[in-house]
Structure formats: structure tokens, C-alpha cells
Amino acid sequence: MKVMNKKLLLGVAASCAMGLTAGAWAADAATADEVVAKVKEAAATVQAGADVALTEFDKKDGKWAWKDTYVFVLDCTSGIMKAHPSEKVKGMKLTDLKDKATGKEFGSALCAAAKNTHGGWVEYMWTKPGAEGNHRKVAYVLSAGNYQVAAGVYDDTLTAKELDAKVAK
């Protein structure tokens, strides 16, 4: 009887631990609403003091990096990634931004989406901070003066089309 109680107790403890862990993972994922709010805040910051503010977007542990995502800044006029927490990506030509699964260039799509009055969403496969492999990312991008500001949510179900409709409301 005591062995059975110990097994039952261990089983309950393991289930609780897995439940808490799964909840913690879910809490660490940025939502589309958070991304929109953060991009709008970042766009206002960039417009207020563009070049001075840009270095803040390069910090992996700064204000603009949260949960499993981060804000990045593009310069669609010159065609380069102006600010990004990854040294590999910062300064890249936007035409060199390629979907990690298909190899399709998506920098132009980000610039095109930013031209919309309310900004827009672009889907692509990309690396996810703290995770192995490539993950589906849906990024929201908004014009901010001479630059374009973006951040994304890593999600296998959300689509750019449904998110565009939500932002346009």
C-alpha cells in the first residue's frame, strides 16, 4: 500500500511540474497584441529621436527584447537592417533576408507592408531566440518616419491576413 501511495504521489507531482512548465512556456511567448503595442511604442520612440534611439534596439536584454521576441528597425530607403539584436542581421541588405525554409526573400515584403496606413503583417520562417531550428514567425511592421519598425510573434496558426484585418479595425 505504501509503495502504491508513493507512486501515486510521484505521479501527481510530475503532472503538476509538467503543467507548471507548460504554463511557463506559454507565458514566455509574445502575443500578437503585445507585438502591435510594442511596435507602436517603438515607432513613436524612433520618430522622436531616430538615430539616438537605434542603439537601444541592438540590445538583446534591453527594453525592446521581451519574452521570445524583439523589435528590429529597417531602413527601406537604403535597403538595410538598421537595428537588430543579432550582430549577424544588423546591417544586412534587406534583400538578403531569406525565409529559413524556402529561401524566399522577405525584406521587400516587410517594406511593402509598412506602407499600409496601419502597418502590416508578414509571415516567414526564422530562428527563435533560445530555441533550436527554424520557426514560423509573423511580423508586424509599421513606418516610423524614415525607418520601419517591426517585431514578430512565433506562431504556427496565426496568419498575416487575419492579423491585418484585426489591426485595420
Image (spheres, grey):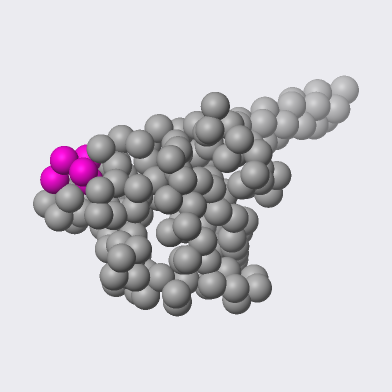
Residue under the image location 29 percent in, 42 percent down = 43
Q: Quadrant of the C terminus?
A: top right
Q: Position of residue 81 (x, y in %)?
A: 33, 66
Q: Nearer the viewer, residue 22 or 76?
A: 76
Q: Which residues are magenta?
A: 45-49
Task: Say left or right for 120 vs 72.
Answer: right
Relative vertical location of residue 154 with respect to residue 35 in this rendering, above or below: below
Q: Position of residue 56 (x, y in %)?
A: 21, 50
Q: Quadrant of the N terminus?
A: top right
Q: Nearer the viewer, residue 15 or 153?
A: 153
Report which quarter residue 131 is drawn in. Answer: bottom right
- Determine if residue 88 is in view: no
Residue under the image location 76 percent in, 32 percent down = 11
Q: Nearer the viewer, residue 48 or 69?
A: 48
Please count the marks in the image: 0
Q: Position of residue 16 (x, y in %)?
A: 67, 28
Task: Say left or right for 53 vs 37.
Answer: left
Relative vertical location of residue 93 with respect to residue 72 in this rendering, above or below: below
- Determine if residue 113 is in view: yes
Residue under the image location 64 percent in, 71 percent down = 101
Q: Main secondary structure of the magenta part?
A: helix
Q: Nearer the viewer, residue 87 or 2?
A: 87
Q: Is residue 46 magenta?
A: yes
Q: Position of residue 65 (x, y in %)?
A: 35, 46
Relative vertical location of residue 139 with respect to residue 88 in this rendering, above or below: above
Q: Is residue 94 magenta?
A: no
